[in-house]
Image (cartoon, rainbow, N blue to C red):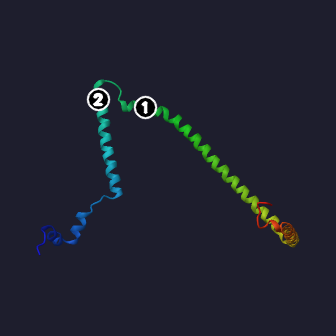
Amino acid sequence: MSLSLSSVSYLSQPNYSRRSSSKSALGSFDYAFLITALVVICGGCLFMLDLASARSTGQESMLLSFVSQLTHTLPSLLSEISTYFTLFLSSILTSAVLVGFVCGLRALDQQVTGSSKQQSSSYFSVKAAKVASINQYKAALRGRESRLFLISPVFQ
């Protein structure tokens, strides 16, 4: 009949305190803000240390030299990227125009042949019936000729 001390203390706590102590999670926006703040603060400290070491040695800062090289290469890099991106977009546009053209031709074909199908549908149905009856007659003739081989078609 003895209860342990932890179960008694758990029961004595109110509901809201149990919920808050069991789950304390950061939201995604809070997490993104804290990470961004950490990166900015640490990056600023590293940049200041780089500038201070460059000034004390009398040389150009490594970060500033990287930025100057980047400003020279960035326009040529952007021109290459924009060229290939423009080619990609033009191929998509060309494909879309071709698909639209084919759909338009199909719609035009359906409009043109739709009226002639109604006029000549009786001719095609009569011709199809004749062909079907001829095929049935030929199949019946073949069945009479090869009736002996239906039991063992290997010898046929």
Label 1 environment density (alpha carbons within 10 Å; few <14, some 14–19, many ≥20): few
Q: Which residue is mark 1?
A: 68
Q: Position of residue 134 (x, y in %)?
A: 88, 69
The residue sitting at 44% across, 31% down in the picture is: 69
Q: Are marks 1 and 2 in contact (CB under 8 Å)?
A: no
> Looking at the image, which residue sits at the far top?
58
**Which quadrant would residue 84 be assigned to in this image?**
top right
The amino acid type of the residue labelled 1 equals: Ser
Residue at the bottom extreme of this rendering: 1
- As helix, strand or loop, the secondary structure at mark 2 comes to helix
Query: In this orientation, which residue lies closer to the viewer: 154 or 47?
Result: 154
Residue 21: numbered disc? none
Instruction: Look at 73% across and 56% down and name the residue there.
Output: 102
Q: Mark 1 vs mark 2: which is more N-terminal? A: 2
Q: Could you give the CA–CA distance between mark 1 and mark 2, rounded to whole angstroms?
A: 18 Å
Left or right relative to 15: residue 146: right
Q: Which residue is mark 2?
A: 53
Q: Residue at x 76, y 58 (%)?
A: 105
Q: Is residue 108 left or right of residue 67?
A: right
When the figure is inspected, residue 23 is found, relative to residue 89, above or below; the finding is below
Q: Is residue 109 above or below residue 96?
A: below
Residue 146 location, x and y as percent?
Answer: 84, 66
Residue 113: x %, y % from top left: 82, 65
**Which quadrant of the figure has residue 20?**
bottom left
